[in-house]
Amino acid sequence: MLNALLIANDRSGTSHRLTRSSLPGHWVSDPASVTEAQVRAADIIALFGGDGTMQKTLSQILRKVPAGELPPVALLPFGTTNMNAKALNGAQSKRAAVESLRQAICSGSFRETTRPLLRIRSGAAIEHGFFFGIGIIAEVVERWNEQRKGGALANQAHSLWAMITGLRNVKSATPVTIDGKAHSVYGLLASTLDRLLFGSHPFWGDQLSGELRLTWVDSDARNLLQHAPALLRGKARMAAVPGYECRAATAVELAFSGSFIIDGEIFHLKDESLTITRSDAIRWLAL
């Protein structure tokens, strides 16, 4: 049997308590209390929560143990939004993911994949996550966080409507310097995932899976709603549409003032710069 470190935030409101009796391992209820010794002693780490909880927990762990030295990590979809867990687990349900994890712990056998996280540095502060966004993306997330209520399905429907409404009513652009070149963008995102919220894939070109991929919409782009379906599906024809840009990178430096999000968590930057790179590859359980 594997030595499993099972991390869940009791204050997040997730229903992980139902799984405690069926999953053997060492349970930690406060992610901030996880120690380097606990991480290094574990054969696998399992995180229970949504995207925001996982972002904070992984960032805390990576301040103590380098990405390349982590044991395999499992993400369990116990939050309001579970984009990261769904991307890594093939959109398995909560119940199916828990059962797959139980079998992995008891048998010592599991499938795994490797993928880096984004590493976002601003000054001395370093955060990690799978998804970064500014402009209309950050505005939609902030609005959704203020208004969300009800179950996961209702919140997903609300977030989709907030995205459509935001595209329809976009009026202002965010001035940003991308690798030293000035732009004015309606929205910009970066990720190492292949699939984002609602299964979208807003990348086109020759980018490889697991690369740091960057997509943005300049303020001179036209017909946002008309092009949105092709943008979200990463259609190759987007490469020829003025104002829509996508590229892979090893590092990106951004300078702007305003809000940005990492996996749904909101951060703020005021006339500063940040650098986005990839972490070392992390092993993930494919539940």
Image: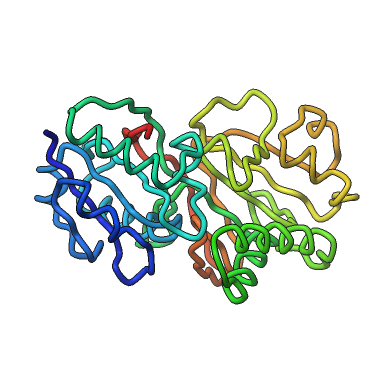
Colour scheme of the picture:
rainbow
The image shows residue 44 at horizontal and vertical percentages of 21, 39
Q: Nearer the viewer, residue 111 or 152?
A: 152
Q: Is residue 141 above or below residue 113?
A: below
> Does any portion of residue 175 appear in the rendered image?
no
**Relative horizontal placement of residue 142, taking residue 43 as reference (left or right):** right
**Relative horizontal placement of residue 121, taking residue 34 as reference (left or right):** right
The part of the image, by quadrant, that contains residue 68 is top left
The image shows residue 9 at horizontal and vertical percentages of 30, 64
Q: Nearer the viewer, residue 270 or 285?
A: 285
Q: Residue furthest bottom?
A: 146
Q: Residue at x 69, y 31 (%)?
A: 204
> Does any portion of residue 260 appear in the rendered image?
yes
Q: Residue at x 74, y 56 (%)?
A: 185
The image shows residue 91 at horizontal and vertical percentages of 51, 39
Q: Residue at x 25, y 39 (%)?
A: 102
**Relative horizontal placement of residue 133, taking residue 135 as reference (left or right):** left
Q: Residue at x 25, y 55 (%)?
A: 7
